[in-house]
Image (cartoon, rainbow, N blue to C red):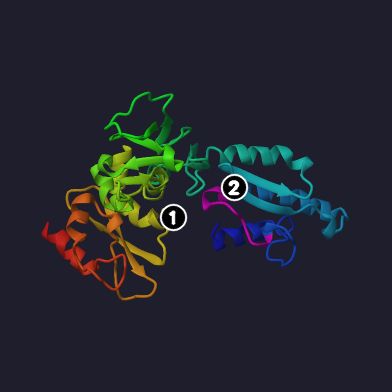
Amino acid sequence: MNKGNTLALVAAAPLLYRLHGTTGSGWSIQYGFECGDGWFDLLMNLSVKIEADLQAMLAEGKRRQDLPCVHQVKEKFGTLRFHMSQFAQWREWIDEAQAESAKTCELCGAPGALSIRGGWYRTMCPRHLMLSGHVPGGMGDFYFLGSDECLTPRGTPREGMEYQGIIRLATGDLDVWNRPDKKMRGLVFADELPPPLWPALSREADEDGMIPAGKVTNYLYANRWLPNVRAVLGLPPVEPGDFVEEAEKLIRHQDMDLVGSVVLPGLRGAVPVFVPNDFKDMKIVPWEFMPEWLAAEFRGWHVGAQHRLGPYWFDFQAFVRRR
């Protein structure tokens, strides 16, 4: 939760949150609230009600240090957790707040739904669900199916390989194989990748053209807001304005700071622009975040550029304008 909302909650309930800011208390509330700003209103309503009871107890002569207080406020399994030293008399209010959090977007406070994605639980509104790639109540927009559910490969049979199942994508199924001689599980073949995934993933292939399936699924998880990946996954495109506003919440790139995005002609979408931490005057559009038609053009540019993620922003911008 941001600093302003944190301080507002502490100011509204100073007895309840008296451990906030203290050092060595042993409880995480000393550092703040471990959840998104979308739950600020429901936390404020709960806090004000409990604080009123605590103030009444103090007026009746109970010592301040003996009053119940909050030890931790966080998100867990997509809903609010509110832990106090003593809570029995407020259990109903706390349960109500937790139930409310399960239908309130943790990011913005709009009406939301609980989603499960790759073992991660989040409660988000339709807009943030769309941006993140989560699917309400489901396994997600891509997933692995074992060979007991998909009895035969959809692509080319592979000699000496054992068929394991598929990675299901909106653009078609991607077969997953095993090399029993090397005890390796979960391999896909680069020549079966959907075209939009080729620039980012083909270079991960070994000399036999095989890629660990985990690299494919990890890439889809990490980059599901990109126009090409969203198309592969069957998700609606991200509007450029939404991208600029939300990208920092949804992606972190190693040693890079996100500074904006480029709107691409003919696409309802955008690609990110980064600044390397060690080259503050150089704007970068990494290859792996480009649509396939752009990546194909730029892979041959600027060999030996100053940053391993090149190419230069100005060349990219000019090329997009020409197209």
**The magenta segment:** 30-41
The spot of residue 279 in percent (x, y) is 34, 75
Q: Which residue is mark 2?
A: 75
Residue placed most toward the observer, 189 or 318: 189
Residue 22 percent location from the top left of the image: 72, 66
Label 1: few (<14), some or many (≥20) within 10 Å?
A: few
**Residue 31 highlighted magenta (yes or no):** yes
Relative to residue 98, is residue 119 drawn left or right? left
Furthest-front residue in this view: 181
**What is the residue that sits farthest to the right in this orientation?**
61
The residue located at (79%, 52%) in the rendering is: 68
- Quarter of the view holding residue 7: bottom right
Q: Badges 2 and 1: C-beta atoms under 8 Å apart?
A: no
Give the class, few, some or many, for how many residues have Cα within 10 Å of label 2's Cα (few <14, many ≥20).
Answer: many
Q: CA distance from mark 2 to mark 1?
A: 16 Å
As for residue 213 lying within the magenta part, the answer is no
Instruction: Report which quarter residue 130 is drawn in.
Output: top left
Q: Say which element carries label 2.
A: strand
Q: Quadrant of the N terminus?
A: bottom right
**From the viewer's perspective, is 147 left or right of 9?**
left
**Left or right position of 167 against 119:** left
Q: Which mark is residue 249?
A: 1
Pick the front one: 323 or 6: 323
Q: Amino acid at mark 2?
A: Glu
Quarter holding the C terminus is: bottom left
The kind of residue on which mark 1 rests is: Lys
Q: Secondary structure at mark 1?
A: helix
